Image (cartoon, rainbow, N blue to C red):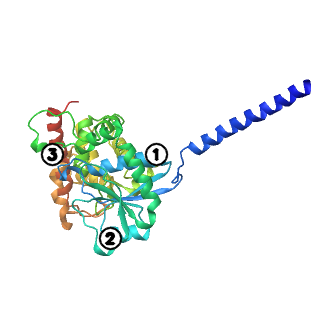
Amino acid sequence: MHRIARFATVILTLALLMVLGGRGKLRDEAAPTYLLEGDTLCVRIAIEGGIYINQGHPSGFHHDMLKQFTRHERCHLRLKPREEVNYWEELISGETDILVISAESVEIPDEFIGEVISSVDVNDAGHAWVVSRGNITLLQQLNYWLTYFKQKEEYSQIVKRYLRPYRRNHFTMSSAVSQLSPYDELIKRYSKTIGWDWRLLASLIYQESKFSMNVSSVRGAHGLMQVRSATAKQFGIDDIFDPEQNVRAGTMLIKRLQKMYEIPEIDSLNRIKLVLAAYNAGEGRVEDIRRFAEHIGADPNSWDSLREIIPQMRKRENIPGGVLKFGQFKGTETIKFIDEILERYDTYAALVKK
């Protein structure tokens, strides 16, 4: 009898282990698979952004969406700047994994029609993510995720944040507004690190990029605050097109420039103007202007005084030997840069909530 009882106990234990083992197997099979885990997706956003179109900020919209996708897939995102290259050849060759286009305004070239395939619409504006036909696994992941994510409230919030119309510039602002850009909260947070009114920093960012995060200049500056890659590296920034990293780099540069002009002879307003001048022309050039001012007896600590003597630096015969390190300086761009930022800030201060 005891032998039968022990045998029954063994059978029951084995059966229980098989059931538990089976359940574990079912859990493993039901667990999500991350086919892209650890990979880096290289993306070009070939859509005009910023204030230039009525749809708001599509570059920021797609960047945020792609960040959500790569976070879901446990992979990484690398955004390539908009530049004069053949996007389609780059996509086919594998140099780019995803090309973001407006299907309503961009036609696939005839020679590439059979080589690429697009995702489902990403938004109501007819934007799509295009991959090479050989990258069908990526397309399947994109379509699956988009179908799922577009049903979430988080998607609606991203659409509202980026694709709503914003007031284009301060000249059209005749009444109070509550928001300037999709990046207001980011700007507010980082303005505190430099002691600026956030609306002043917003005015600088508008001047540099019109609040478009996917722009590059011919001088090699990128993103919202038009930061150079070398400058970003100095501050440990590795993704210059990521809005937060870009603003962090830009404000870290401003903080460094502020320390240069933290002397009793420079008041707070002139300190801001000198920082803006150095941000635009470089600190070495601003030091040239100040040395030139001292040489001719002008006040090196007053921007109004410095802007008056800048025209004298445009002619070689006016430049004394050994005073300037960078030679002639036209300066009209820098003067305009500061004037427009401060004029726009006055409008923002009057019409945008602090």
Q: At label 1, which amino acid type do we have?
A: Arg
Q: Residue furthest top?
A: 1
Q: Which of marks 3 and 2 is in front?
A: 2
- Mark 2–mark 1 Cα distance, whole angstroms, equals 30 Å
Which residue bears the numbered disc 3?
A: 169
Q: Distance between the residues labelled 3 and 2?
A: 39 Å
- Alpha-carbon neighbours of circle 2 within 10 Å: few (<14), some, or many (≥20)? few
**Residue 256 figure quarter:** top left
* Residue 120, picture quadrant: bottom left
Under tag 3, what secondary structure? loop
Where residue 296 sits: x, y (%)?
A: 20, 53
Q: Quadrant of the C terminus?
A: top left
Which label's residue is closer to the chain start, 2 or 1?
A: 1
* Number of other residues with Cα within 10 Å of mark 1, as a class: few under 14, some 14 to 19, many 20 or more: few
Marked residue nearer the N-terminal end (3 or 2): 2
How many numbered marks, from 0 up? 3
SS of the residue at dot 2? loop
Residue holding disc 1 = 71
Location of residue 213 with respect to 107 vertically, above or below: above
Label 3 CA crowd tier, 10 Å (few <14, some 14–19, many 20+): few
Q: Give, as a three-letter code, the residue at label 2.
A: Ile
Which of the pair 297/50 is nearer the observer?
50
List the residue tagged with mark 2.
113
Q: Which of marks 2 and 1 is in front?
A: 2
User: Is disc 1 in contact with disc 3, using a CB cutoff of under 8 Å?
Assistant: no
Please give the name of the residue rendered at 34% of the width and 69% of the height, measured from the top-left corner.
Answer: 88
Q: Position of residue 73 (x, y in %)?
A: 48, 48
Residue 209: which disc? none
Query: Mark 3 or mark 1, which is nearer the start of the sequence?
Result: 1
Left or right relative to 35: residue 118: left
